[in-house]
Every structure is written in structure tokens, then in C-alpha cells.
Amino acid sequence: MEHQRQGVERPAAIGSVVDAMPLHTAHTLLALRGYGLAVSSVAVALGTSLLLATYNFRGVEFPLFLMAISLTVWYAGVVPAIVALVLSGLGFNYFFTQPIHTLYITREDFPYYVVFLIFALLITRFSTIRRRIERDLVESRDALQKEVVIRTQQANLLDLTHDTIFVRDLSDRITYWNRGAQELYGWSAEEAVGKRTHELLQTVFPVSVDKIQSELLLSGRWEGELSHTKADGSSVVVASRWSLQRDEQHSPVAILETNNDITQRKRGEEDIRELNRELEKRTVELETINKELEAFAYSTSHDLRAPLRHVAGYAELLQRNAVSVLDDKGKQYVLMILESAKRMGILIDDLLAFSRIGRTETRKSLVSLNQLVQEARIEIGGEMAGRDIVWKIGLLPEFYGDRSMLKLALLNLISNSVKFTRTRTQAVIEIGCTEQGTKSTIVFVKDNGVGFDMKYLNKLFGVFQRLHRTEEFEGTGIGLATVQRIIHRHGGRVWAEGLVDGGATFYISLPKL
Amino acid sequence: MSSALGRILMVEDDPRDTDLTLTALEEYNLGNEVVVTRDGEEALDYLYCRGKFEGRTSENPAVLLLDLKLPKIDGLEVLQQIKSDEGLKMIPVVVLTSSREERDMVASYKLGVNAYVVKPVDFHEFVNAIKELGIFWAIINEPPPGSMRRS
């Protein structure tokens, strides 16, 4: 009873004082207040009865005492009520029953006390019921308040998310609209709630609405891409998720729709598709060009060589059969024709070999560069006849590449070194390798030959580019271009250092295994 | 030059090439052994004794010198036709061409060519190549039965 009173009955002023006190002090104070109410209410009832008795109003004392007891029971609980009951009994007995002013109880007095008691019990009972109802009411009110707080927090949380969330009932009318929805579409919750979703957003569905509805009813959810129109008239593509909310009877009541703006992503995807299309087109173009190039190389191979052969053939026949009618100049001319035809033949062959490097597939295997150097030296043995050449060949790595191509590259470099050291009494050719980090290996071919001017470095690796006159050093100018093409096809790099009359060094870098 | 009784059948569309080849062969007195046809169709007409070659004796040549780039029916088609024909497949076929293209070489060998010769640009080399071809196929080599014999 005491406990219940704390929450329910105490006046606000006392309550706040009580709140500030230690707990046991508060209890004592409330108990005293209960007893005080018992004593004072009985005293007031007695006083009023005695006052009325002096004015000859009889028979009111009993109801007044009952009122005092009722009041105490109602507001102060059972124990103070017993005090009030005893005090009322004593007061009634002493002042109003015969013999007056004694505490003697006659038999006629019993019904009064019984009524007092029954009345007190009844009031106590009513009071208990009242308090319980009050407590229940308060509890449910508190629970409701808590619920409201939680719901409000949840609703605020939904407002925090960037996702667009709204709820619509089965007639498609919007019942909830979060801030994300406002931000995406441009309508506030006040504007949107109550509107029909698909009218407001002008939804464009990927499939028929009926199909979506049936899937939603069947599985409780649907996912897909929708196109919506914003308040400002611009359109937006969203990844949409629908969830069907059902009530306790399991009948659908609402649809929760969560939308993510994927317009940018879609645009990105479209861009990528566009780029891919462009790339495919370019690939086809390149393939066409490659085929044309191949056809060109083929016809060069076939059609250009035939007339050349005829020029050489008839010039030869002229030299052989008509030598008697030719003067010295004429014989010289025929010789020039033959030399030129021969040179053009070599040029065509070199150019074809060069174009073939770009066209043929590389057949890769593990290749020992030392072995390739050895083979290359043997192959150009003829060029080295009667020469004094000092070879310094270091340990070279193994490399994964096309054997014949790599050999051709080394052959060109070594042959170059041999050729351009021709003017030296003793040629020194050094072949070695230096490590370059962990990614690639550098192989160099160094000679003490005639070298070159670094200002023509950019021409060194060009097709048909020559830095020396043909009468000094023969050649078509395709060798270094071939080296570069081969090394590029292996993912490597070529460069060179040189000094006029101070030798040259050629470097090739090859990616490591 | 185009006697109906040659043991060497040459298929060559370029008259200058024909001229130079015959010049080379004449040095070994093989010039009058050569029958020249100017395209693939004519070559097949000769081999099948039809068209303007209807009246010739039906013996096969001892060797066929075949250019690849020909009008109408090209060299590879002629080669394919010969090698798939029971009566002709034994004729030794030498491809004599300007093309050093690997794919032509591969295609020719796949079809069963007996030799593949790239005509050298240098005339001396060219003459040597033709002479050696002529001597080998027309003189040293024993042709298969049913071929024309040396007269």
C-alpha cells in the first residue's frame, strides 16, 4: 500500500520533497502522513458530531465516522484505516452510546461496530480494486509512451538512411515517406503521403505490373530496376526492393519499397558498353588493316620480285651476249643495273622478313641466350674471316621467348658490331648482362667500332634508316628496326649509347621470368 | 617451244619468266622438251588431253613446273586437282614461284608437292636453279610409269 501510494496518491509537492530524501526517511514520512490522516479525519468527524450534537442534530455521528474511516482507507491504506476504525469506535462509544462518557460497550452497540468493520472492509476492497485499475492504467500508459518513443526513434532512424524508403497501402497510396525519398524525388513527406505512388513517380516497369504483384503476393518480395520521374521532371533509375507487410491474419496490408539511385551506375555501364562497342569496332578495323598489310606484303613478295628478276635476267643476258657491241660505259651501265637489282632484291627480302616478325605468332620456349650468341657467331663466321676480334662474353640469363626471333635479334646486333669495327686493327666486342631490379634483365652488346653521333639516336632504330654511307658500310638499314620489333614483341625495350669513333653499346631489356 | 611432245610441262603466265627459264634450259638442250601453258586451266586441259590438246598422246609429262600465281585457276588449285586424281597424282610437281611466303609453302607441301623452289632474283642463281631442276627431273630422275620417255 505504501509503495502504491508513492506513485499514485502523493501530492506533487510532497512527492518532490520525498524524492529528494533517503528512502527510509521517505517511508517514515509517508506512514506518519497516513496515521495523521486517520487521526485528523476521525478528530474532524468527532468534532463535527459533537458540534452538531450541541445544536441537537442527532444520528449524524455514525455516518461521519464512516466517512472518516472511508477517507482513511481510500487515501492512506489498511493500517491507518485500522487506527481510524479503533479511534472511531472509541469516540463513538465514549461520546455517543449509552452510558455516555464511558468506554463500556453494551450489546446494542455491537451492530454499529460490525457495520463499521464491514464498511471498512468494503471500502478497503474497493480501494484495492481502484488502485489496481489505476496501476494497470499507468503501466499501459507508460508502455505506450515507451512504444511511442521507440517508434519515433525508429522513424527517425529511417530518416537517417540515404536509402529511399516509403510505404504504400494496397491501393497504392503512400503512407510513409522518409527523408531519403524526399531527397531523391524532391517531394516532402507532406506532399507525397496520400498520393498514388505510380502516378506521382510515373513508374516505368521492366515487366508487367501484374507479374510483379503476383510475385509479391507469392514470395512476399520483389526486386528489380524501375525508372521514376522526379519532382523536377528529370528521370532516375532505381534498384527497387519491395516487401509485403501482412497483418496477424496474414492478409497483406502494405508494401515497403526501398529504392537505391543507380542512375550513375547505369550511365557508367552504358559508357563501358559504348567503349566496348568502340573497341570491337577498332579491333575489326585493325584486323582489316592487318589483313590488308598481309596482302600487301604477299604481293610485294610475289609481284615486285618478278619484274626485278626480269631486269636482272635481261641485264645479265645483255652482258653475256652483247658484250662485243657495248663500249666501256655501256658495260658499266649494265653492271650498275645488275648491282641495283641485286640490292633491291635484298631490300625486298629484308622488308618482308621485317614484316613477318610483326605478323607471325611467337612460339615461346626457354632459351639460353649464351647458346644463341654462340650460334649467331658461327652463322656470321664468313664476315669475320681475316679479322682480329677479341670476344668478351659474360654469363647470360635464360629467357622465355621465341627462339628464332631472339636469335635474329642477337645476330643483327653482333653482325653490326663486327661490321662497324672493321676499321679497327683489333676489334673488341663485349656481350654481357646487368640486372635491373627484379623485373627485367639487360643484355648489352658493346664494341670499339666507329660508333655514332647521339644526336641521331632517334633515327637509329627506324626502318631503312642508316647513319653511314653504303660505300663505307653496306646494309639496308633494317637490322636495328628488326631488333627493336623483336624485343618489343617480347615486352622489352631497346636503346643505345655511342660516340663518334668511340664505339657503341646496344642494350636490350627483357622482362624476367 | 610448244611442241606437243615435251617431257617438261611448265605453267607460267609471265612471258618474260618463260623466256628466261627457257633460255636457262636451252643451255642444256632441254628447251625443246618444254611445253608451256599460260594458266591453270590450260595446264589441266593439257593433262586431261582436252580442248586444244585433244589430239595429243596421253602420256604424262616427266615433271610439272608450276607457278602459283596464275590467272583463272591458280597453282595451288592445279596442284590439288593433280594430287587428287588417280591418273595424275604420280606426276612429280615442282612449284617454281616468286613467293617466299610460308603459308604458300605449307599449303603446297600439304597438297603433296615434290619440290618447292623460290626463283632467285640474281640471274646466275636463277639459271643454276633452273638447270639443276631440269637436269634432275628430266634426266636423272626415273619418272613414274606412264610418263613420256626420252626420245
Image (tube, coloured by chain):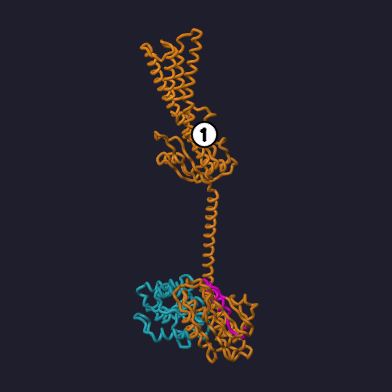
Chain colours: A orange, B cyan
Viewer-closest of A367 and B144: A367
The magenta segment is A469-494
Relative vertical location of residue A180 with respect to residue A55 in this rendering, above or below: below
In percent of width and height, residue A342 lies at 56, 83
> How many other residues sit within 10 Å of disc 1, few (<14), some (14-19) or many (≥20)?
few
Q: Position of residue A300 (x, y in %)?
A: 54, 74
Judging from the image, mark 1 belongs to the subunit labelled: A
Quarter of the image with the N terminus of chain A is top left
Can I make out residue A306 in this image?
A: no
Q: Residue A244, how many percent across, how many down?
A: 44, 39
Q: Is residue A166 above or below residue A54?
A: below
Q: Horizontally, is B52 left or right of A237 in the view? A: left
Decide if residue B89 is in sight here. Answer: yes
How many numbered callouts? 1
The image quadrant that residue A180 belongs to is top right
For this rendering, which residue is in front, B48 or A512? A512
* Residue nearest the observer in this picture, A326 or A502: A502
Residue underneath mark 1: A19
Quadrant of residue A63 in the image?
top left
The residue tagged with tag 1: helix, strand or loop? helix
Task: Point out the residue furthest to the front here.
Answer: A102
Q: Is residue A490 shown in magenta? A: yes
Residue A125 is a magenta residue: no
Direction right: furthest residue: A455
Residue at 35%, 81% (x, y): give it.
B144
Outermost top residue: A56
Can you give x and y, in whole percent of width and height, for residue A405 in the image? 49, 76
- Amino acid on which the number 1 mark rests in the picture: Asp
- Give the camera-side residue of B15 and B124: B124
Residue found at x 49% / y 12%: A50
- The residue at 58%/81% (across/down) is A505
